[in-house]
Image (cartoon, rainbow, N blue to C red):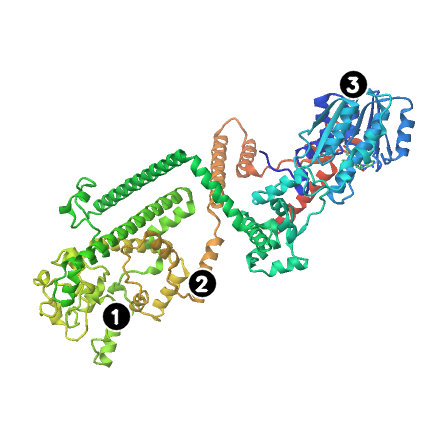
Amino acid sequence: MGKAQKKTGKGRLDKYYKLAKEQGFRARSAFKLIQLNKKFSFLETARCCIDLCAAPGGWLQVASKYMPPSSIIVGVDLVPIKAIPRVVTFAADITTPQCRNLIRGELKDWKADVVLHDGAPNVGTAWVQDAFGQSELVLMSLKLAVEFLMKGGTFVTKVFRSADYNNLMWVFNQLFGKVEATKPPSSRNVSAEIFVVCQDFLAPKKIDPKFLDPKHVFKELTAPAPVDGNVTIAANAQANVFQPEKKRRHRDGYADGDYTLFKAIGASEFIRSSDPVSVLGSGNRITFPSEEEKEWFALDVTTPEIKANCEDLKVLGKGDFKALMKWRSSLREEIGLDVKAKNTEEITETVEVVEELDEDEEIQKELERLNTEAAAKAKRERRKANESKQRTIRRMQLQMTAPLEIGMEQNDASLDVGQEDVFDLNNLERGRKSTRLPDDPADLDEDSDNGDRNEEDASDADSEDDVDELEAELDNLYEAYRERKNERDAKFKAKESRSKNKNREEWSGFKADDDNEVGGWEEMEAAKAAGESSSSSDSDSDDDSDSDAKGLNATGKRGAQTRPDTRKKRKLVVDLGSKTKGSTSLWFDQDIFNDINMDEANEDEPLSDDAGEGPSESDESADHFEIVPQEQDDNVGMWDADDTDDDEEKRRYLLKNGLTTAEAVTLAQQLVNREKTKSQMLDDGFNRYSLNSKEGLPSWFLDEESQYYKPNIPITKEAMDMLRARQRALDARPIKKVAEAKARKKFKAVQKLQKALKKAEGVNDSTDMSEREKAQQIQKLMKSGMSNANAKRKSEIKVVVAKGAHRGIKGRPKGVKGRYQMVDARMRKEMRAKKRKEKAAKKR
Ligand SMILES: C[S@@+](CC[C@H](N)C(=O)[O-])C[C@H]1O[C@@H](n2cnc3c(N)ncnc32)[C@H](O)[C@@H]1O
């Protein structure tokens, strides 16, 4: 479908408007007649034509163009029509006898072959009145047509799609042999106009005056329309309720007798009507004016929601209409219009009869239902099996399980251990329960009802498995969604790659590097140490949060390591390889497992500092600082393997681009101005959530967190000013394209000059010319070599207006030299305005 045509604004200036302008037609409507004539060919053979409602004269121009040269053309309109060669025009109202007399005077006893009517009452009143006026005008033009048309003649008229369209068509059919309604392509789709071409006028001796009397032809329209009885209204109204979301267009105009836009319905009309749906569809609002209705309004069944629904029916959806219908039923029961019990009884009885009759059918249905249920169950199980297979594959990929045949491990009890998610707390909890020893008498009691528990556990585990599966499924869906989005959304893609390339975030900072540190930990500590004999507890409060993970000894003291070394590689994840225990036992080292009897397993473990077997550095530590035991550099866990590269990349990025964000500049300025030390900045980067494990969190959560949970680093005015200044400097530079174009121009000029120089040398060396000639030639060459080829100005185009003496001239107008362009006055005005603008812009 093409674009919707507009009748107003710039949409008015469509293809036909431009064509009309180009071809000198006074109105774009000229093309409607051209297209009608193309289809029905009535103008070429016509000797006499009357155009009723002809101003400004587009149709008259067409008629004079297509009709034979010696034919008579008469045009009438309320407004005077500018003269057209070979056309007689006068101003008159076609509904008056004067108009008839004028035409008669002009034609004498001639008869017309064609009567055209393109009238439209342009009174700007309501559309319904317009439409009626139009139909009346059509009938008036028909009245003139039948008087002046010769037998076999053609009457072309414009009608609007309205309620009286069919009546008009009926009348036309009584008077003409062939009647066809058509819409030429140049008639806008948004317009309700249709053209009716009535051919082969029957020219009856006597025409019943009722055919031409609006009172008779449009009789139905004036009669009041019944509300309930009218099928169309009812159908429309029903559609209003059943499909409230669909906006229906009233192409056929207003329904008969229903000319108002807003209609309020009394509640009683809706409640008591036998066709409540139609009532709902026909109104805008339900009101409660009478005493009885006011009482209904106060009833409990008339909830605030119902009251709100009654306010504006045109904005309601299906659900709201349903609610109104329910309210109607309740209210009817309440006021005794309906009896509920009786209805139910009736329904029950009917059901019983149906049951007796269709027992076989019922059995069949039941069987079908069972079959569908079984199929659904099988499907569910298949899906479950698939999902667990997927999980196994994922575990394998993470090397958390041996590459056994997929699915085998589920059936093999011996493989049960270790197949669960290592980090699945549910499994741990279950394991804890099963390994617990009955030290405590309460435990013995607990063991007595172990059987019950196990069953409960099993069912709990099942439901937890279900939840896990559901989560896994959701995760998969989320991943699939991200992938799809990645494919389609370029913005999202860029964001993704940015988030992958996190190291470009300047203010995320570098890892502590003693060489670069401004201020520094040692200096601060030294200052502190000088002033106080510091206690071990308050010296390192910022690191308490990870004390558990770093392994506190039994007395709460940490391994004595020297601070600078430990700070160098601050890792948040414990190096699994540095421990003698396996990863699982490391996991069980956590506090929550303290009450589990695992002493046996831990017997061989050295209790780091407690046993005095901590790292040698501990002995060297003279002070009583609690130092977090740290890994050696070569113990960097696999998790941190990328970190150094990140820093390198960050450095490279910063060296290349400098600081690009206000936050980064603020931090840098604070460092340089010694407002803060690097250590302080690092500390600022931590908060109580920093060390929260992200393990097991759904990816959508992590994504959202990375999107919205951003550090809020305060920025300074100076930082902003600095960035702005830099941006201004960047802006002041010419853009690459301009610079390239300038360089190209320069390069070409140099080449041209070199060429000229070469030629000049040739001239200089030649022996056939005198010195004077040589000098002249060289001067010429150098001049052309130095000149800019692009500087050649094209001669200006002269604008000639096609009016007065130039009107209709083909070829070059007299007295015009050089390049020229024929335009109309408007075009010249526009061109001049354009030039003026360009000049003004240049001055600026
Ligand atoms: C759409 S214009 C006709 C355009 C014309 N066919 C053309 O091509 O230039 C409709 C014209 O009907 C005229 N009109 C409306 N009521 C009329 C009446 N009662 N008698 C004569 N002309 C009337 C208006 O003045 C208006 O100029």
State the image coordinates of residue 358 (x, y, percent, origin top left).
43, 35
As measured in the structure, the alpha-carbon distance from the residue carrying label 2 to the one carrying label 3 is 83 Å
Amino acid carrying label 3: it is: Thr
Q: Earlier in the sequence, mark 2 or mark 1?
A: 1
Does residue 816 sit above or below 609 in this rendering? above
* The furthest residue to the left: 604
Q: Nearer the viewer, residue 366 or 658?
A: 366
Label 1 amino acid? Trp
Observer-side mark, 2 or 3, equals 3
Residue 690 makes an appearance in the image:
yes
Which of marks 3 and 2 precedes in the sequence?
A: 3
Q: Quadrant of ligand 1?
A: top right
Q: Which residue is mark 1?
A: 521
Give the number of the disc on residue 720: 2
Residue 632 visible within the image: no
Query: Mark 1 falls on what kind of element?
Result: helix
Q: Quadrant of the N terminus?
A: top right
Q: Residues within 10 Å of mark 2 (few under 14, many from 20)?
A: some
Q: Can you say whether 486 is above or below 656 in the image?
A: above
Q: Secondary structure at mark 2?
A: helix
Return the residue at label 3.
Answer: 45
